[in-house]
Image: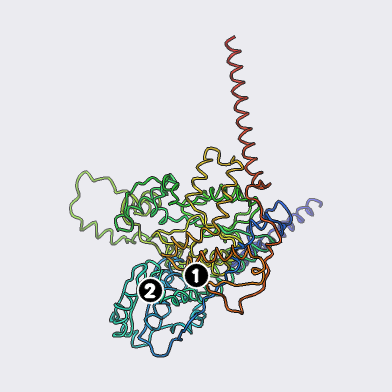
């Protein structure tokens, strides 16, 4: 009887387990059916972002001399104020104009920004209405979201039109008749070179504009108007400033994400510095810096340099001495070198460093030394979630986004028909052909280097990534402008023109000239580093003082060098003196020595125009309450960094000597 009862209980237990298993399976299938597609979206919400700051101290003293040396504003530039408003007789655009200017712009972020400011000035010069420029990298054919036309993928279109209402008539599209003429290719097209003179537009473009009522201008290389204009065109320079610094506002979603990143960086209550490496393949190939890598990236750069030589972009030899070019300041400063310089200047290990343009050519391995010197090295990916980044792209169609085309599909009937038409077979039969070998997988992803002088055509995914990079650069641009300090690794692009970092430095100079913006001379830094190359992390106090003096001097002297080297190629990289004025404050008038220094530095930059009365505030600088820190005086941060390196090297050397002595004793004992 007991056995029957036990078996009955076992059956009920087994039945209950089976029912629970079925219920669990049905529940999992239901969840997978209705919630599986949302798992990827909600997963990043578990953590806000991946950065977890590491700080040695809980608070920072914002009032001592050392803090002011590292983060404080430049006193001699404190009286400079932004002023891009017209200063003379300036007429607003009328309803009567000579025609419409339709523009197509190619290139990256800094080239687009330069070109837009130039084309607005050109439109006013021609008394023409400007059609919203078309950015070739953001058209629907490049795989971007169809919700954006082109210009509004990156910038706020409505704000652009409204901000320039008193300068140029801006329309969103051509009139119907001119649209038909453009569609039938009855519109004159001008492909303009970099830094074209105003005379070309007045003598060549203007007559065609008056005749056809519309002209199309193609801008392939960025700036389409020469940077330095005669004094009679000075108002056009200020128009460039109004376009770049006021009218070009990023799309709302992009602006909000950039502002959110800035707030997250500032949430710790500590200042942060932005570092822009400037390591792009085109720039490294153009300037002959291939031997700095010694891997497959060198081969890719040499291939690009060969193409540049063949097409006349550069004149020179394919193989150059990259080491010598680095010593001459032609090549960029590597992240490791920037890290050593910043530690020598006195920035502590827990300094927050935001890396702009984080897609380095050469890979993230180049950032390893910088990460070892600073604990809080971040970029936009570590301060945002995947959902936040993908939200700014809009809805994108992935149906045609295969990275490479698939081989054609051959049916069995087609195979049989081809077999019957092929004629008699040789005997014996040849071995079967190997599997189809496509160009993109022949030697890895760089296999095309050995097969063709041309790079393979970009796929839809690669074109889409190029469009995304414009948004990434826009985010980095917002963060760079708001940073407490900025330092570039390189300031030239793949055409020898000022790059992203140059635009950032020009914008920071315009908005607040006194902010900490370093302009390191690459040649001087390279020679300083070469002096201690054999003991790079064991520098003495004299060397540290030399680095500090150079970086401190670069805050002022770098502006003079930018006026001589960058401004002739890009006005926005140094909008001085046209777009700045001198503010006379009561504080400066009381301190004669400080006032004399300020006037001397400002006049050296060419700024002599006095700000209007409304801008002459009585803001007292809080820097005068503190004494200047002696650059030659050792501080705990840099001394500790280099002292630890010397102690480590000394310990290794001592251990080596001990090992040699032990080996010598063993040998002597063996001889005995």
Dot 1, how many residues are within 10 Å of its Cα: few (below 14), some (14-19), or many (20+)?
many
Residue found at the far left of this picture: 424
Residue at 33% across, 83% down: 214
Q: How are the residues colored?
A: rainbow
Residue found at the far bottom of this picture: 95
Q: Is residue 473 left or right of residue 95?
A: right
Q: Earlier in the sequence, mark 2 or mark 1?
A: 2
Up-down: is 125 above or below 665?
Answer: below
Q: Disc 2 on helix, strand or loop?
A: strand
Image coordinates of residue 31 in percent, x first then y, are 63, 66
Give the labeled residue for mark 2.
104
Q: Is residue 387 visible?
A: no
Q: Disc 1 on helix, strand or loop?
A: loop
Is 176 in front, or is 238? 238
Q: Quadrant of residue 228?
A: bottom left
Q: Are marks 2 and 1 in contact (CB under 8 Å)?
A: no
The numbered mark at residue 76 is none
Q: Nearer the viewer, mark 2 or mark 1?
A: 1
């Amino acid at each position: 009887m007991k056995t029957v009862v036990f078996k009955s209980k076992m059956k009920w237990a087994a039945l209950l387990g089976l029912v629970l298993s079925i219920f669990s399976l049905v529940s999992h299938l239901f969840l997978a059916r209705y919630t599986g597609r949302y798992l990827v979206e909600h997963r990043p919400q578990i953590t806000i972002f991946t950065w977890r700051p590491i700080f040695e101290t809980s608070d920072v003293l914002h009032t001592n001399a050392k803090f002011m040396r590292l983060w404080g504003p430049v006193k001699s530039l404190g009286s400079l104020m932004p002023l891009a408003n017209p200063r003379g007789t300036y007429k607003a655009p009328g309803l009567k104009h000579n025609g419409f200017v339709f523009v197509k712009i190619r290139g990256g972020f800094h080239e687009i920004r330069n070109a837009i400011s130039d084309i607005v000035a050109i439109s006013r010069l021609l008394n023409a209405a400007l059609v919203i420029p078309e950015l070739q990298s953001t058209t629907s054919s490049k795989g971007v979201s169809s919700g954006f036309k082109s210009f509004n993928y990156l910038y706020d279109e409505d704000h652009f039109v409204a901000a320039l209402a008193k300068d140029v008539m801006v329309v969103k599209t051509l009139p119907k008749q001119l649209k038909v003429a453009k569609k039938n290719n009855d519109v004159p097209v001008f492909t303009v070179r970099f830094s074209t003179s105003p005379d070309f537009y007045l003598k060549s473009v203007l007559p065609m504009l008056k005749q056809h009522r519309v002209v199309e201008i193609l801008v392939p290389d960025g700036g389409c108007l020469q940077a330095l204009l005669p004094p009679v065109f000075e108002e056009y320079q200020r128009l460039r400033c109004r376009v770049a610094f006021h009218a070009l506002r990023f799309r709302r979603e992009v602006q909000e994400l950039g502002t959110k990143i800035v707030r997250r960086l500032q949430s710790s209550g500590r200042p942060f510095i932005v570092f822009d490496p400037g390591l792009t393949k085109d720039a490294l190939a153009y300037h002959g810096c291939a031997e700095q890598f010694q891997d497959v990236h060198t081969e890719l750069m040499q291939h690009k340099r060969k193409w540049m030589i063949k097409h006349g972009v550069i004149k020179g030899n394919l193989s150059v001495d990259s080491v010598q070019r680095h010593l001459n300041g032609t090549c960029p400063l590597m992240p490791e070198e920037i890290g050593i310089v910043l530690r020598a200047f006195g920035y502590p290990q827990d300094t927050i460093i935001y890396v702009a343009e984080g897609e380095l050519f050469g890979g993230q391995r180049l950032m390893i030394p910088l990460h070892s010197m600073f604990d809080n090295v971040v970029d936009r990916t570590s301060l945002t979630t995947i959902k936040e980044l993908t939200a700014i792209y809009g809805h994108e169609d992935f149906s045609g986004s295969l990275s490479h085309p698939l081989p054609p599909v051959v049916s069995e009937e087609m195979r049989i028909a081809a077999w019957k038409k092929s004629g008699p077979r040789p005997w014996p039969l040849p071995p079967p052909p190997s599997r189809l070998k496509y160009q993109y997988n022949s030697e890895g992803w760089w296999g095309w280097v050995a097969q063709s002088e041309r790079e393979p055509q970009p796929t839809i995914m690669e074109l889409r990534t190029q469009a995304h990079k414009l948004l990434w650069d826009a985010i980095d641009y917002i963060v760079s402008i708001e940073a407490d300090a900025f330092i570039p690794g390189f300031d030239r692009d793949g055409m020898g023109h000022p790059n992203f970092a140059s635009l950032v430095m020009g914008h920071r100079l315009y908005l607040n000239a006194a902010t900490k913006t370093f302009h390191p001379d690459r040649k001087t830094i390279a020679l300083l580093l070469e002096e201690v190359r054999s003991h790079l992390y064991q520098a003495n106090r004299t060397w540290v003082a030399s680095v500090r003096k150079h970086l401190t001097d670069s805050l002022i002297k770098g502006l003079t060098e930018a006026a001589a080297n960058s401004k002739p190629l890009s006005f926005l990289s140094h909008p001085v003196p046209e777009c700045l004025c001198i503010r006379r404050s009561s504080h400066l008038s009381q301190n004669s020595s400080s006032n004399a220094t300020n006037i001397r530095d400002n006049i050296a930059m060419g700024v002599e125009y006095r700000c209007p009365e409304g801008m002459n505030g009585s803001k007292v600088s809080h820097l005068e309450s503190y004494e200047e820190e002696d650059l030659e005086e050792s501080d705990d941060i840099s001394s500790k960094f280099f002292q630890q390196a010397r102690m480590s090297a000394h310990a290794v050397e001592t251990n080596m000597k001990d090992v040699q002595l032990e080996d010598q004793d063993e040998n002597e004992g063996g001889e005995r």
